[in-house]
Image (tube, rainbow, N blue to C red):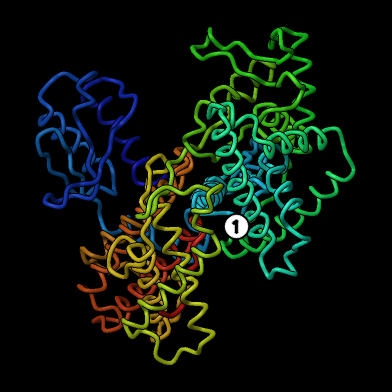
Amino acid sequence: MNLQETLSHNVKQAVKAVFNADLESVEFQATRKEFAGDITVVVFPMLRVVKGNPVQIGEQIGEYLVDHVQEVKGFNVVKGFLNVEINDAYYLEFFNSIKDNESYGFAETNSNGKAVMVEYSSPNTNKPLHLGHIRNVILGYSVSEILKASGKKVYKTQIINDRGIHICKSMLAWKRFGNGETPESSGLKGDKLVGNYYVKFDKEYKKQIQDLISNGQAEEEAKKNAPLLLEAQNMLRKWESGDEEIVALWEMMNGWVYEGFDITYKNIGVDFDKLYYESQTYLLGKEFVAEGLKTGVFFKKEDGSVWCDLTEEGLDEKIVLRSDGTAVYMTQDIGTAIQRVKDFPDIGGMVYTVGNEQEYHFQVLFLIIKKLGFDWADNLYHLSYGMVDLPSGKMKSREGTVVDADDLVDEMAQTAGEISEELGKLDGYSDDEKKALYNTIGLGALKYFILKVDPRKRILFDPKESIDFQGNAAPYIQMAYARIQSILRKSDIETNKTLDLNDLVLHVKEKELLKQIELFPEVIQNAADHYSPALIANYTYDLVKEFSSFYQNVSILGADTTAEKAFRVELSKTVANVIKNAFGLLGINVPERM
């Protein structure tokens, strides 16, 4: 049992012994810096079962703990807060038990438990990945790693939106204006080339709209009647009917895009266990729409379109099939969810990493799947996140005003290099070493800046602000890790040995550091429960702040005794291990030197 579990058990025992009352739970919080103590028991919630003055109740519980719990050496009560002091022996025993465990904090995978599938990225094959995708990818990957660390079996996946009118827009523009251009002939990554034609379609489409308006059509009418849009819609119908020429064009251009995506994912440092394609799952969705029509889950309108009535659930009617028989996103998502459980029967839940503008869509999707009779629908979760803005404003793919993901990663590395050179910290590094370090710092800064914020909040991203060697930013934490590696290289202490700590008296800074280390497993579980990498990021920052205070106030290699020196070296090594593990959950690397 950890400290909170031990104390919780004994506080309940105290309440039973002293007041003859049963306490369901015990509320803890960190002890405020101005008071003596290592952990605080909040007395006020106990007043529901124990009547009396909260200070007197706290005093009586404190006395019981000192008398009956060997870990407790003292206490004080401030108003309704019982501040408990823990003896050094507890922390030293804890430290010896975990110091050589490189996977400290991570729970063993429950092989008998249900797996979780986490979906992230899920791009369209008509454009390259951009800054908005980066938050999605970084968030989904990190949540996957945190869930794994909490003991769950996890499958990482994406649904590639490789069909539909948007894809046909790029295809039609290339066919009309491309003159046979390829990634090889242009020197462009395939996803960027295809994205250029998506922008080209939009420009030509707007010209046609203006021409129609100038000839007397209303704007809405002109948008529907523009020849380019009508041709794209016809191309989509041909694709769905299996037209050989259109399908061959689709396969060629999608192939270009996939090669581009693979490069970007590798650069960002994320991966997937299984890929799904809308072109393969929408038909299964249509099958279940047909099945739902028979069972009354769906109904057909006069124009032949198929809908689901969710008004009794406080929502509205939702289309699941167009009147011409073509699928909508909802059709595909129904089919994809069902296909995933067919492919992985041990899935007990799914996490969809999708922006908050799609919250209503997922409310509807989860309800429809439940109405279709799938009990796992209760374990579907929309990991909703806010958009990422830049100082220059909102991005629009069709207008070509997005921040390209590859360009952003390159810019982050370049900015990291400029700042590092200004600080003059890279003497003795080769050019290749510098390049690798700049990439580690830049990409780490990008990921941390995004992940340290609650996923639901909108972010204003400034690349230079994210590369901070002093504040709550990845470079500051990476610097602390590198500093510890320097200490370990200089030390003549042999690590990974059982330490004799019987006579050691902890310095207050050592104790604070141990208390922070002990929280790590609990933080992982909380982060998994709330799908929030921000809890990991900010925990790591707090840990590094504690280490920095320890480093400034306590001599490590110049300790008075060999025992103190050995302990402090091992303590530093353990801090580094926790930093590395925590940053690994965020998808961030840590450099051995900076």
Identity of the residue drawn at 71% across and 34% down: 230
* Residue density around tag 1, few if under 14, some if 14–19, many if 20 or more, within 10 Å: some
Q: Quadrant of the C terminus?
A: bottom left
Residue furthest to the front: 215
- As displayed, is residue 221 above or below residue 124? above
Given residues 482 and 576, the one toward you in this image is: 482
Residue furthest to the right: 244
- As displayed, is residue 93 above or below residue 484? above
Residue furthest to the bottom: 428
Q: How many marks?
A: 1
- As displayed, is residue 244 above or below residue 375? below
- Taking the image as drawn, is residue 149 in sight? no
Identity of the residue drawn at 54% across and 35% down: 214
Quarter of the rendering containing residue 513: bottom left
Q: Secondary structure at mark 1?
A: loop
- From the viewer's perspective, is 255 left or right of 13? right
Given residues 181 and 48, the one toward you in this image is: 181
Identity of the residue drawn at 10% across and 25% down: 53
Quarter of the rendering containing residue 57: top left
Q: Quadrant of the N terminus?
A: top left
Residue 216 coordinates in the image, percent (x, y): 56, 28
Q: Which residue is mark 1?
A: 270
Identity of the residue drawn at 68% across and 40% down: 228
Given residues 399 and 260, the one toward you in this image is: 399
- Taking the image as drawn, is residue 133 in sight? yes
Residue 212 coordinates in the image, percent (x, y): 59, 34
Residue 375 coordinates in the image, percent (x, y): 65, 21
Residue 444 coordinates in the image, percent (x, y): 45, 64
The amino acid beneath tag 1 is: Val
